[in-house]
Image (cartoon, helix red, strand yellow):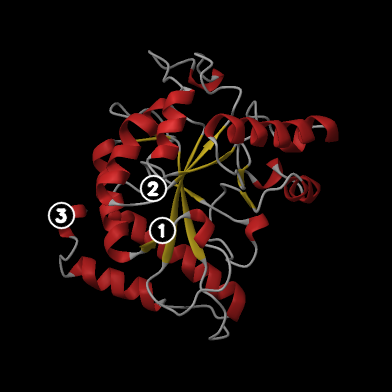
Amino acid sequence: MNEFEPEPVCIAAFHRIAKQPAGELSYSPAHFRKLCAFWREFYVVLPLAECFGQPDAPGRPRLAITFDDGYADNAEIAAPILAELGLPATFFLPTAWIGSGRSFPWDAACSPAPPVMDWTQAQGLVCAGFGVGSHTCTHVRLASCRSEQRRRELLESKRELEDRLGIEVLDFAYPFGGREDCSEEDRVAVAEAGYRCCLSCFGGLADARDPMHARRIAVSPRWHASPRAWRRHWQQALNEWRRKRSGLDVIVPSHGAQIGANLGEGKAGGLG
């Protein structure tokens, strides 16, 4: 790998921070706090807008924290923990669901179904200094949209967020997040709608120079139950990144090795 090539950015994606976690999309507050404290110590945690472009100089690995779907617990539980730790984050909201009083259909089996935040809570995120981005209006799968519907989903969600929250909305994460859920034509439409990035959620690290193909790691209670488990997953992703660019079979990343050494010494032992 060229020594002047920027290291990738890690963008973590959460959905729910729930006191009673259920399924792959929910993470407990205690584990969330531990993971965030670990990130604060071993990563440079940046606002999403600062993740893209050339870094000034090599240093600790860069990471951004994001949330999808606008669950009320994002505002009630996650945001206060982030604020206490002094960490930035971006929340991607599907505008037709915010303040609707409805729950998502995929949560029908939950009792009670987790609520979606209202506009007062969304405004509170902005007032607390967090970023807000679009997740379409209706949480539609972009790849299934005709061009006019896609245009409405992109433009109207952006406009409503800006009008209601008094901010400029430049960040976009497409619903469902799979490779097949957003085509190249869809990404062109995202850029034409005025967004600066288009985030997926199928794993891997993001190329800082290509924000329209930015990848995210969905944080899972099964695969990332502790900071130690997170580090293993992140190091694997970084190894894969470097392997693709260098053609080498085995790569030991310097940052990963240092983080691993610190964990082994017990420096972050209370977080495991």
State the residue position of label 2.
Answer: 223
Nearest-to-viewer mark from 2 and 3: 3
Q: Amino acid at mark 3?
A: Gly
- Quarter of the image with the N terminus is bottom right
Q: Is residue 17 at all visible to an observer of this figure?
A: no
Between marks 2 and 3, how big is the CA–CA gap?
Answer: 19 Å
Q: Which mark is residue 270?
A: 3
Quadrant of the image occupied by residue 182 = top right
Q: Amino acid at mark 2?
A: Trp
State the residue position of label 1.
Answer: 233
Between marks 1 and 3, how big is the CA–CA gap?
Answer: 19 Å
Give the percent coordinates (x, y) of residue 176: 60, 37
- Is 171 on the left or on the right of 25, as rendered? right
First reached walking from the N terminus: tag 2 or tag 3: 2
**Pick the front one: 164 or 229:** 164
Between marks 1 and 2, how big is the CA–CA gap?
Answer: 8 Å
Residue drawn at x 49%, y 13% as measured from the top left: 101
Kindly check if marks 1 and 2 are in contact, taking CB atoms under 8 A apart as contact. yes
Quadrant of the image occupied by residue 54 = bottom right
Q: Hey, which residue is sitting farthest right in the picture?
A: 147
Q: Is residue 258 above or below residue 107?
A: below
Kindly check if marks 2 and 3 are in contact, taking CB atoms under 8 A apart as contact. no
Q: Is residue 256 above or below residue 270?
A: below
Q: Is residue 227 above or below residue 148?
A: below
First reached walking from the N terminus: tag 1 or tag 2: 2
Give the percent coordinates (x, y) of residue 31: 27, 43
Residue drawn at x 69%, y 33% as measured from the top left: 141
Q: Is residue 156 at all visible to an observer of this figure?
A: yes
Mark 1 nearby-residue class (10 Å; few <14, some 14–19, many ≥20): some
Residue drawn at x 39%, y 51% as measured from the top left: 88
